[in-house]
Each structure stands twice: as structure tokens, then as C-alpha cells.
Image (spheres, grey):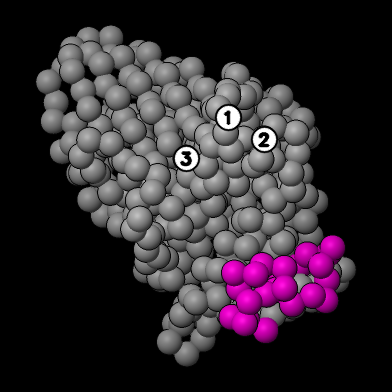
């Protein structure tokens, strides 16, 4: 699409949560996009800037109710669905076939019917699942570029897969023991407070949650298996007393010792990936907050490797990656509208 004269017309379904807020923050300043409408049933009729005060006086958009007719999507090129798990299963099949779809929930990420039921407690989508491409940009550019429907990866999945993908592609995960220790900020639990997720309960605390049952596990295992030999992992998530950010420590013990230039392996793997930065020592979530970057550091000795990765869970782990995928789907440079800087300090 030539956006020098024609902008991509998009709709955002579910704009009142953190994911929707970040989509608005990014897309309002995307040179190739026009937001036609954004829905939030509970805020229908209210200006976007009244609900998301960080966007006050930056847009005249108002929230609308969910369209009840397919005709309301006439002229729309792409739809972002930024709703809790389960809603896209009902919405996506009703959207016009010519509209491209990017779903930010987990509804279409997992191919295995039983795994989807076990981890999400939902009935699998059936045939429509086959239309969705898993949208981890850095590993799947060719299929994303030609896709009509994208299942945007989960935040933990993004941090973990990007950390381990070069090892998987090099055949170094086959037969290896893998332990992932991942930590997230409170915004990952969404805008509505609940027991153990509300920030006042988390701000001075630290604890593990969902041992062996986190819903991102099957998508991580599914995608790493598609990249190379992989026989599972131990995956543990923790609540971190910050608002934004994911920090993943991925420990890999090979079945044998090898001599390899790990930083070079990673630099080569991500040579053409603007948003993956290979850093020395350790990443820091302060370096990636409010940006679409994933910072990675890798270290090894003998059979033992450790890979650290850090992302902003709401940007690279959700809305930023969704926009990165939109760019690919419409033939734009994938960094368009996403050269966002963090702050220092």
C-alpha cells in the first residue's frame, strides 16, 4: 500500500484498557495510519482524552459502542482486537473477509485444542484458527507479510522466544535442560484491579504465580518447536514491584560442552531486527520502558548458558509488536511509527 497518499484505515475494538491505550498512543502519530473509530462500550460517547489522560488534547476521537452491523466496517483496512481472552473468538468470525485482523488476546495463538482448553478454559476456534498466523515479528516476517489475520504473541512469550530463538534455530535446545525465570510488572494484569494483581498489593511485594500453568507456556513451546529441536522447559512467572516491564532469565544446560561465540550467534540472528539489541552484561527494564525494543544479553560457560531479555510488556509485549505486524502486512518499513525512545533516568 502506498501510504504517501492513502493511509491505512484502522479500527480498534477495545480501547479503554492498557493495550488499547498503547495502540492509541502509537497510532495517533503513525504517519501511515488513520484511526477511524475505537470502541469501549462502558465509555461510549466519551472523548478518548477524558479516559486516557495522557492523550488529552492530542485527539478528537470519542469512544463508540461495538458495531452491530458488518457494514460499519466498510472502508476499514485493519482491525485491532484488544479485549480480554474469549471475546475475539466471537468477534473475528463476524468481521468482513477483506479486513485484516490483529488480535492481542490469546484466542488464536495455540493450535492444540486440548492445550487451549487446559490453559484458557475455552473451546478452540476450529477452522478459523487456521487463518491466524503467530505474529512474532522477528522470527516470522515472510508469513506475517502475507497474512490476513495475526495472533499477536503474549508478553512473556515475546521475551522468552526472542531470548531462545537463536539457540533453537542453531539446534542447541534439543536435549537441553531449560529453565525460564520470568518477572513482570503490574500493568501486565490489566487496568481493572483484582486480588493479587492490584498495584498497591504488589508494589512492596514479590511472589511467584501460576506455577506450571501460565497460559503463555504452550505458545512458547509451540513456536520454539517450529524453529528447531525442543523438548520442553520449566517456566516460572513472578510478580515484580514495578509498573512496566518484563525481565526473563533463561537458563540452558546443554547435554554436552561446546565452544561457540554466543554474542556473535545472537548478533547474526538479529542482524536485520532493528528492535532487538544485543547488550553487554545485563539488560535493564529502564532502558526499554515505553519502547518497542527487546534488549538481550547472553553468557555461557561449558554446558551452561544464560540469556537475559527485557521488554516493555505493553509495547514490544503487546501493542508495539501489533503495530510492527501491521506495518509488515501493509508493506511498510516495520519500524514506522515505532521509533519510540525511553527516558533517562
Residue carrying label 3: 246
Residue carrying label 1: 205
Marks 3 and 1, the one that precedes in the sequence: 1
Instruction: Please state which of the two labelled residues, at mark 3 or mark 1, is closer to the viewer.
Output: 1
Q: Are marks 2 and 3 in contact (CB under 8 Å)?
A: no
Is the residue 157 above or below the residue 329 in the image?
Answer: above
Q: Residues within 10 Å of mark 1 (few under 14, many from 20)?
A: few
Q: Residues within 10 Å of mark 3 (few under 14, many from 20)?
A: many
Q: What's the distance in space between the residues labelled 3 and 1, CA to CA?
A: 16 Å
**Residue 201 numbered tag:** 2
Q: Quadrant of residue 102?
A: bottom right
Is the residue 165 above or below the residue 88 in the image?
Answer: above
Residue 259 is situated, as x and y percent measured from the top left of the image, at: 12, 20
Task: Point out the stretch of residues depicted in magenta.
Answer: 37-60
Q: Are marks 1 and 2 in contact (CB under 8 Å)?
A: yes
Q: Nearer the viewer, residue 343 or 226?
A: 343
Q: Is residue 205 left or right of residue 121?
A: left
Residue most extreme to the right = 68
Q: Quadrant of residue 70?
A: bottom right
Is the residue 60 above or below the residue 171 in the image?
Answer: below
Task: Assign a secondary structure to mark 3.
Answer: strand
Q: Is residue 217 visible?
A: no
Location of the C terminus by quadrant is bottom left
Q: Residue at x 48, y 17 (%)?
A: 234
Residue 13 on the magenta span = no
Amino acid at each position: 500500500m502506498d501510504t504517501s497518499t492513502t493511509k491505512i484505515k484502522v479500527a480498534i475494538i477495545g480501547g479503554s484498557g492498557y493495550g488499547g491505550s498503547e495502540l492509541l498512543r502509537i497510532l495517533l502519530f503513525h504517519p501511515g495510519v488513520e484511526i477511524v473509530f475505537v470502541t469501549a462500550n462502558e465509555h461510549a460517547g466519551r472523548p478518548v482524552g477524558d479516559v486516557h489522560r495522557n492523550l488529552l488534547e492530542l485527539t478528537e476521537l470519542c469512544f463508540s459502542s461495538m458495531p452491530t452491523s458488518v457494514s460499519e466496517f466498510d472502508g476499514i483496512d485493519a482491525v485491532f482486537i484488544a479485549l480480554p481472552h474469549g471475546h475475539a473468538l466471537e468477534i473475528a468470525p463476524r468481521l468482513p473477509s477483506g479486513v485484516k485482523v490483529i488480535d492481542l488476546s490469546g484466542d488464536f495463538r495455540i493450535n492444540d485444542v486440548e492445550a487451549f482448553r487446559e490453559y484458557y478454559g475455552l473451546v478452540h476456534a476450529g477452522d478459523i484458527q487456521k487463518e491466524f498466523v503467530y505474529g512474532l515479528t522477528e522470527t516470522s516476517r515472510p508469513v506475517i507479510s502475507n497474512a490476513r489475520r495475526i495472533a499477536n504473541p503474549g508478553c512473556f512469550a515475546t521475551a522468552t522466544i526472542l531470548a531462545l530463538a537463536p539457540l533453537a534455530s542453531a539446534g542447541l535446545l534439543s536435549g537441553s535442560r531449560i529453565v525460564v525465570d520470568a518477572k513482570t510488572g503490574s500493568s501486565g494484569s490489566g487496568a481493572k484491579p483484582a486480588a493479587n494483581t492490584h498495584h498497591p498489593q504488589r508494589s512492596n511485594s514479590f511472589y511467584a504465580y501460576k506455577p506450571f500453568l501460565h497460559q503463555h507456556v504452550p505458545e512458547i513451546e509451540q513456536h520454539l518447536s517450529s524453529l528447531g529441536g525442543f523438548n520442553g522447559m520449566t517456566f516460572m512467572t513472578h510478580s515484580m514491584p514495578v509498573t512496566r516491564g518484563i525481565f526473563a532469565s533463561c537458563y540452558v544446560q546443554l547435554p554436552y560442552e561446546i565452544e561457540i561465540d554466543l554474542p556473535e550467534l545472537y548478533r547474526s540472528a538479529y542482524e536485520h531486527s532493528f528492535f532487538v539489541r544485543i547488550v553487554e552484561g545485563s539488560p535493564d527494564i529502564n532502558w526499554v520502558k515505553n519502547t518497542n525494543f527487546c534488549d538481550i544479553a547472553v553468557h555461557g560457560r561449558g554446558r551452561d548458558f544464560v540469556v537475559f531479555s527485557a521488554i516493555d510488556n505493553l509495547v514490544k509485549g503487546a501493542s508495539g509488536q501489533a503495530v510492527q505486524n501491521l506495518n509488515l502486512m501493509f508493506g511498510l518499513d516495520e519500524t514506522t511509527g515505532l521509533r519510540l525512545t525511553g527516558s533517562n533516568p
